Amino acid sequence: MSQEWNIRSRGHICSVCMKGLVDRTPVVSVLKETPSGYDRLDCHPECWKTCERDWEPFSQWDGVYFAPVKEAKKEPVKKEDAGELLRQLVALDDPEMKNVVYVLAVMLERSKILVERDAKTLDDGSIRRVYEDRKQGDTFVILDPRLRLENLAEVQQQVVALLSGTKTLGEVASEEEAAGNGEISSDEASEPQAD
């Protein structure tokens, strides 16, 4: 699959019976892998249990459906918050930004904005982590670049620079490319770490 990450928004109708989902009721969310990426299905639990299918989900979790709430218009903010920055980076689909995207997702998880729903190791050894936005219900499938500890501080500084507006996406992407991405190779991942 060419995409290293992507977003799938929460549905507002059951993907099986096509009836509206009801605020604050149980829902089963499923990611289905397709040749072009991932499709997200949100279903009433009863519908999911009884629907016939000839495929296995890439990821599946139980949750609670929250109807969208219209918020009052806010004054334009010049600096993007972390969630908006993550959405922008995922939309860009720039492989040079994979470390920044991953660290940003982990920061949002620690801030209780995202919750990790699943992690899948693919045949090529790469790990895809499935995150869900707790408030908006959007799903993010993000490549875990398996960062080295010595590269983590630099990537965190890049995220802070992007959030504060002191660096542009282009500047950070150039830094990532020059740094060689700080990934762990599959050979190094299997070697025991020295104490």
Image (tube, rainbow, N blue to C red):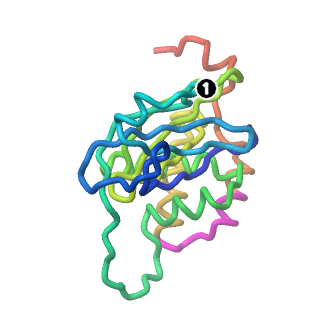
- The residue that appears at 44% across and 61% down in the rendered structure is 83
- The residue that appears at 51% across and 34% down in the rendered structure is 149
Q: Is residue 13 above or below residue 119?
A: below
In front of the other: 165 or 9: 9
Find residue 1 and report its horizontal and vertical position in percent.
Answer: 74, 37
Describe residue 139's horizontal placement relative to residue 99 as left or right. Answer: left
Find residue 8 and report its horizontal and vertical position in percent.
Answer: 54, 52
Q: Is residue 11 above or below residue 46?
A: below
Find residue 61 and report its horizontal and vertical position in percent.
Answer: 39, 34
Q: Which residue is mark 1?
A: 55
Give the prevailing secondary structure in the magenta stretch.
Answer: helix
Residue 125: image quadrant is top right
In front of the other: 46 or 143: 46
Find residue 79 and report its horizontal and vertical position in percent.
Answer: 46, 76
Describe residue 125's horizontal placement relative to residue 144 as left or right. Answer: right
Q: Which residues are magenta?
A: 164-174
Asked if residue 167 is among those painted magenta in the image, a careful observer would answer yes
Quarter that holds the C terminus: top left
Residue 76: image quadrant is bottom left
Asked if residue 77 is among those painted magenta in the image, a careful observer would answer no
In front of the other: 25 or 19: 19
> Identity of the amino acid at label 1?
Trp
- Judged from the image, the secondary structure of the residue bearing numbered disc 1 is loop
Q: Residue furthest bottom?
A: 75
- Label 1 neighbour load within 10 Å: few <14, some 14-19, many 20+: few
- The residue that appears at 39% across and 38% down in the rendered structure is 28
- All told, the count of numbered labels is 1
